[in-house]
Amino acid sequence: MSTAVKRPTSARRRIYQALVEQPGRHWTVRTLTDALAMHASVKETAVRDTINLLLSLRLVELVPHQRATTIVLTSVGERALTVALRRCHPRQRS
């Protein structure tokens, strides 16, 4: 797995979290950017770059017959991003 996935930036962590929280949702750059609008660190270019990275790693796939580039998280992608997010925020032991 890519280092960019294993050690995501704060913007990528937020993008991964959004994807993992709604794994069956179809996302475009616009809908994902809009969903993360409250986070100033997540710019449209970061969303576009992250989508392209995840496509190249086959962690998301293109949804056919859509005018705008539309992606959906794969089951492998869901597992990989969940692991990446856990590595960023390990659970505290009691």
Image: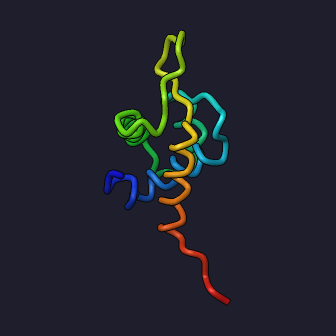
Where residue 41 sits: x, y (%)? 45, 52
- Which residue is at 32% across, 51% downward? 2
**Measured from the top left, where is residue 52 in percent x and y?**
37, 34
Residue in view at x 44 percent, y 52 percent: 11
Residue at the spot 63% in from the left edge and 86% down from the top edge: 93
Locate residue 47 relative to residue 24 in the image: left or right: left
- The residue nearer to you, when weighing 70 against 82, is 82
Q: Quadrant of residue 82?
A: bottom right
Q: Quadrant of the C terminus?
A: bottom right
Query: Is residue 90 positioned above or below 81 on the image?
Result: below
Task: Specify the farthest residue to the left.
Answer: 3
Q: Residue at x 48, y 29 (%)?
A: 61
Number of numbered markers: 0
- Could you say which quadrant of the image residue 9 lies in? bottom left
User: Who is closer to the viewer here, 67 or 23?
Assistant: 23
Q: Residue furthest bottom?
A: 94
> Where in the figure is residue 80, as x and y percent of width and height?
49, 52
- Against 80, is 69 above or below? above
Residue 24 image position (x, y, % from top left): 66, 34
Residue 54, picture quadrant: top left
Q: Nearer the viewer, residue 77 or 88?
A: 77
